[in-house]
Image (tube, coloured by chain):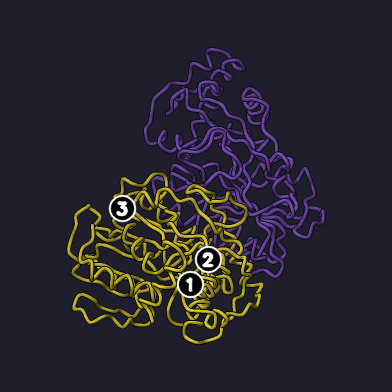
Chain colours: A purple, B yellow
Amino acid sequence: MRIVITGGAGFLGSRLAAKLLQRATLTDARGQVREISSIVLLDVAAASPPDDRRVRAIAGDLTDRESVARAVTPDTDTVFHLAAVVSGQAEADFDIGMRVNLDATRMLLEHCRSLKTPPKFVFTSSLAVFGGTLPDPVPDDAPVTPQASYGAQKAIGELLVYDMTRKGFLDGRSLRLPTVTVRPGKPNKAASSFASGIIREPLAGVDTCCPVAPTTTMWVQSPRTVIDNLIVGHEAPASAFGQTRSINVPGISVSVGDMVAALRRVAGDAVAQRVRWEFEPAIDRIVSTWPARFAPVQGPALGMRADADFESIVRAYIADDM
Amino acid sequence: MRIVITGGAGFLGSRLAAKLLQRATLTDARGQVREISSIVLLDVAAASPPDDRRVRAIAGDLTDRESVARAVTPDTDTVFHLAAVVSGQAEADFDIGMRVNLDATRMLLEHCRSLKTPPKFVFTSSLAVFGGTLPDPVPDDAPVTPQASYGAQKAIGELLVYDMTRKGFLDGRSLRLPTVTVRPGKPNKAASSFASGIIREPLAGVDTCCPVAPTTTMWVQSPRTVIDNLIVGHEAPASAFGQTRSINVPGISVSVGDMVAALRRVAGDAVAQRVRWEFEPAIDRIVSTWPARFAPVQGPALGMRADADFESIVRAYIADDM
């Protein structure tokens, strides 16, 4: 079993690789459980792969056909497509978002289709495909009306994944991830970056600003749980899907104020007081279009799960990343 | 006021041009009612324009940037984008559907965006963006889950039109047309082509085959009414739209058996008996994914209308096209 992870140098990509190495098997497109022999981490800058003979890093731009062909060889069994231009950047620069989130995704799909035995294809979509006025909680079949370019590009990717799957070109699945928190490392250009920052920075003794109101509520999931759910989405039999290949991944609904309160309970007043509230309209405008509560049915039926509560998310971050 | 109609040599394109010439004015993107000074009919083969100094035909491929730039000049006020690869062809040849229905639409949008004063943009979408299990009747905000490539490509076009409108790149509107019948001329590769054929051919004394069951029900509209609704969609103020730019155009719900019965009432037994029933699974598979009944609210509120009944559609065809 040969696996390619795009965005493989990223935080989720390297976590996914580590989990797959530990797991050692996956189910291929023909439903056979097979041993993982090789994982390729494709990213713009080469990943620093773990010390494991099964893993190889390839530096290459996903918008470049040659790079894609070098990574996704004819013996590839699965592609986890994690690479993306994040929400804040896709909104600030429409063209780069289109180039990476739409064009590169399409090229990757077309390349997979061109192989004699097309790989399984797991596309990481996002709750950002939803926006505007929606039922609360959001049901699995809610209308997709994204209110920012990132969500529009992900929604287009989902339509391509479904149509190419329906045509029999490959076996694709689109997983609409909640906001992933707590991410380690530096802030990024995702509009949701603060949802990690308000936990990560105070725990590191650093002051941080929260750009949305304490009442802003988000649909979130820890990295651990996201990785588990990505694998559940990969393993789901093709017969489990109906008239789309898109799944609302379960999460928990937490206000930003409650996130900080959970941090206070876990790490104390002094740490929680490192969060300052400085409203930023550009961030709030994107985040406020995302629904904060879902009623997922299909994801849990497949075996996907949510974190127990936000405190356990904070504790998982301390255990895994500090 | 300078207007470009893509697919201008086609049946709807030339009808639209004729109606616009008769109407003589349109409202531009700034809300000003202006006199129509020029209509450009862009199509692969040059249109045969009516004898009117305001109309000019340009032969050019919509997938070719130069052709688009030659037709959509910086002084263009409105683009009606009617050109498309039809449903049956888009399903039979995925790549040509993607090239025309997606890539050419995107290039046209990008070209409009690049102009100093971007034109208003009317995109003809289709009820084919809907498919699979849906509420009956289909509400305006029903989930978009196309079950054929044509619908997927139109759904992607709608996402682009909305996102580029939201970004302020242009003022776009996507009108989801019912099946248009009765079309004059020859059968085409649309899966819905028979819905015109079963009326047009018998009236011309020609035997014809219907590839779906008499109980198959469709959401239809006469060419006259479609043209009126395209203009209503163009004239609607930007303020009339909410979190999408897509409108379900009203129509009527008629079974194919009732279409033939209406033909019988209008033209007699001998004519209606020219319809034979020969089931074709490839056609039925596409048509049966389209919903047959809608409950449009926004379209009628803007002033769009449906035909009175199918008999009046048959009579309109006889009056306009025979």
Q: Amino acid at mark 2?
A: Tyr
* Mark 2 touches mark 1? (CB < 8 Å): yes
At mark 1, the secondary structure is loop
Q: Which residue is mark 2?
A: B150
Subunit ID for the residue under disc 1: B
Left/right placement of residue B237 relative to residue B32 reads right
Of residues A36 and B183, the one drawn nearer to the viewer in this rendering:
B183
Q: Residue A71 lies in what quarter of the image? A: bottom right
Which residue shows up at 73% across the image and 51% down it?
Answer: A240
User: Residue B85 got which mark?
Assistant: 1
Subunit ID for the residue under disc 3: B
Q: Please state which of the two labelled residues, at mark 3 or mark 2, is closer to the viewer.
A: 3
Asked if badges 2 and 1 are on one and the same chain, I answer yes
Q: Amino acid at mark 1?
A: Val
Subunit ID for the residue under disc 2: B
Q: Please state which of the two labelled residues, at mark 1 or mark 3, is closer to the viewer.
A: 3
Place of residue A277 in the rendered image (x, y in percent of width and height, measured from the top left):
42, 22
Mark 1 vs 3, N-terminal side:
1
Q: Which residue is mark 3?
A: B236
